[in-house]
Amino acid sequence: MSIKVMVVDDSPFSRMMIGEALVGAGYEVVGEADSLESLIETYNNCKPDVVTMDIAMPGADGFECSRELRLNDPKAKIILVSSMKDEESEAEAKRIGVSGYVQKPVDGETLINVIKNVMSPDALFEQLLERGLETFKEALAQNVTRMAKTPVTFTPIESVDTPYISQGITTVIGIIGQSTGSMIMDLSVQSAEKITEAMLRRPSKNRDEVLAMVAELANIIAGIACSMLNKKDKSFALRVSPPSLFHGNTAEIVSPSVKIQRALAETDFGSIFLGVGFKKGSKLWM
Amino acid sequence: MDVKVINPILAAFAEILPQIGFQKVEKKNISLVGSTFNYDGVLINLAVVGSIKGVILIGMDIDSAKRFASQMMMGMEVTDFDALAQSAVSEMGNMVCANACTQFSKIGIDGLDISPPTIMISQGGQATLSVPQTVVIHFLVDSIEIKVYVGLAS
């Protein structure tokens, strides 16, 4: 059965463009509305699976219409389709409970992707779980090889739920997006010193230099891995936090709410532990 | 660091902790440390991404963490800082920081998101953040000492 979509936009041209993209992808446009006046009645009559919603409309805008629609049906799945896309609009959309946000001019493929993901958010999360660790491994291998001129191979390690004990320097980077998660990178002080030396072509002057190198390396790996994933599917919309570094005495690392998938990278300078985990999200922002 | 980032975090602690079984949330004092500081016990790392970025870390010694988890679990005995206790305190971190994002939006800092918590457990551990200065808020929560390290920048 095809997915039923209702298009809310005050511009007949926009409704036609969005409608054609939807029909071309095999979806059914079951209703159209151009204002708050006809919105609820049309929605209740045509019972769409998803509503695309313009923001700038005369009278009640897309936010107000979305609010009314969610009051009428708290399960309504709304995708904002608008040329306006700034932090304030996104924050407002999130507060209302909008499921997705696509910028105009609408790229048909992008819109279809967001609708698919809104209809089955689990599928997107499964993809992330499937591709996540492999992508981070690829980013680590590429960048450690490029920056420190050492080959990288991976030894499989079981992703068991036992706590991990740090080898010396741990970096934790938070990942935000359609799903949230963490990347944990851990290596011994000796390995970090050797990698720093290989990168600087001289021994490190002090611990701060080594820590700065580790933070930068982790930052690059996480940033590149997230960009690679976003390129595969924009709906992931992953962004990274600045790194937190933990060092000093031995530490145990636990991630109670996220299952961390693990890999161990072997280099000429020692091993680098890589842990990546994601938690299911529900919003899609393009 | 702009001091206005502190109030939403204070407000979040004051709002959330009474909802999870604590009576008295007292802010003792606020201090500044550099980007590196020492910790003993438990440190819950929650990253923040949005118009301001960085990390909020919640620290307590192991004994305090066990007492904290016990009180969250309605007085259940907590002899070890085990998986259940770890899950309890990390959930507290998650709730407080999610609420802090709501408090931030009230002062016009919108669209913040937080990462899932990661817990570090160490004696004589050190943390280094990517900000030049870290604000440390000392709380006394029903006589349990908590230190909250705020390393946020725009």
Image: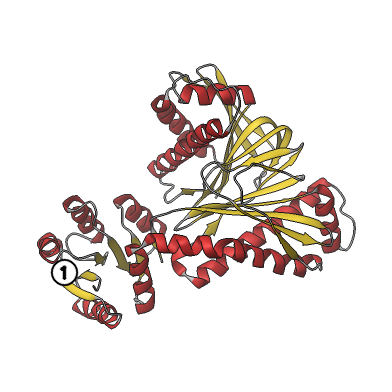
Examine the image and state in which quarter residue A51 appears: bottom left
Horizontal relation, residue A41 to residue B85: left or right: left
Q: What percent of the width, then of the height, locates residue A252?
A: 68, 39
Relative to the observer, which residue lies in front, A264 or B13? Answer: A264
* SS at badge 1: loop
- Number of marks in the image? 1
Residue A183 visible in the snapshot: yes
Question: Horizontal and vertical percent for residue A119?
Answer: 32, 64
- x 68%, y 49%: residue: A171
Q: Identify the residue shown where x is 38% and y is 55%.
A: A282
Classify 10 Å Cα crowding around label 1: few (below 14), some (14-19), many (20 and above). Answer: some
The residue positioned 42% from the left and 51% from the top of the image is B111
Most foreground residue, B76 or A250? B76
Q: Position of residue A129 (x, y in %)?
A: 52, 60
Looking at the image, residue B53 sits to the left or right of residue A143; the answer is left
- Residue that extends furthest to the top in the rendered view of this protein: B143
| Disc 1: which residue | A34
In the rendered image, the vertical position of residue B56 relative to residue B74, given as above or below: below
Q: Locate residue A75, reporting x and y percent.
A: 24, 54
Q: Would residue B29 be visible to someone looking at this image? A: no
Reply above or below: A221 against B45: below
Looking at this view, is B68 or B53 the one in front?
B68
Kind of residue sitting beneath label 1:
Asp
Quarter of the picture holding the N terminus of chain B: top right
